[in-house]
Image (cartoon, rainbow, N blue to C red):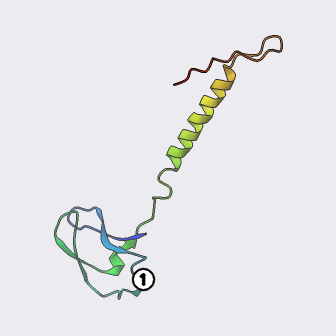
Amino acid sequence: MPKIMILCPIVGSDVSTGLTTETILFGSIPADLDIPLRCPACLKIHNWRPKDAWVAEEKSAHRYYGLILALICVALALFVISVAFTPAPVDGQAPPVAPYVGP
């Protein structure tokens, strides 16, 4: 859910208004309406207007792409290494297999 954000005038950080674009139509808020908000950054009350707010990008879907790509690369590298160091068959025989050791 994309959040509607404002800038805290005291701390200077982005803060959520507690509203999302799924709970309201952002364009439906009157432009001259002052909306009070207890700021989670400085704990003071700020009045904000829709012209001072923006809709934050939703990054949750893209957050783990780099990590997933890195894990795929590691898995592929381990597979290539395991294939490269597997003993080659001698005289057409299958490579030796370790005996099964039960639990």
Q: Secondary structure at mark 1?
A: loop
Q: Is residue 90 left or right of residue 11?
A: right
Circle 1: is it few (<14), some (14-19), or many (20+) Cα within 10 Å? few
Given residues 30 and 86, the one toward you in this image is: 86
What residue lies at 40% left-to-right and 87% top-to-bottom?
28
What residue lies at 54% left-to-right and 39% top-to-bottom?
71
User: How many numbered circles are shown?
Assistant: 1
| Residue found at the far right of this picture | 92
Q: Residue 52: x percent and y percent? A: 33, 76
The quarter holding residue 93 reads: top right
| Residue found at the far left of this picture | 44
Picture layout, residue 41 above or below residue 102: below
| Residue found at the far top of this picture | 91
What residue lies at 53% left-to-right and 45% top-to-bottom?
68
Given residues 63 and 27, the one toward you in this image is: 63
Q: Amino acid at mark 1?
A: Leu
Q: Residue 82: x percent and y percent? A: 64, 25
Picture layout, residue 22 above or below residue 89: below
Q: Residue 40: x percent and y percent? A: 22, 65
What residue lies at 39% left-to-right and 79% top-to-bottom?
23
Q: Is residue 87 left or right of residue 102?
A: right
Q: Quadrant of the N terminus?
A: bottom left
Picture layout, residue 9 above or below residue 90: below
The quarter holding residue 85 reads: top right
Q: Residue 80: x percent and y percent? A: 66, 28
Given residues 101 and 98, the one toward you in this image is: 101
| Residue where numbered disc 1 is placed | 25
Picture layout, residue 75 above or below residue 4: above
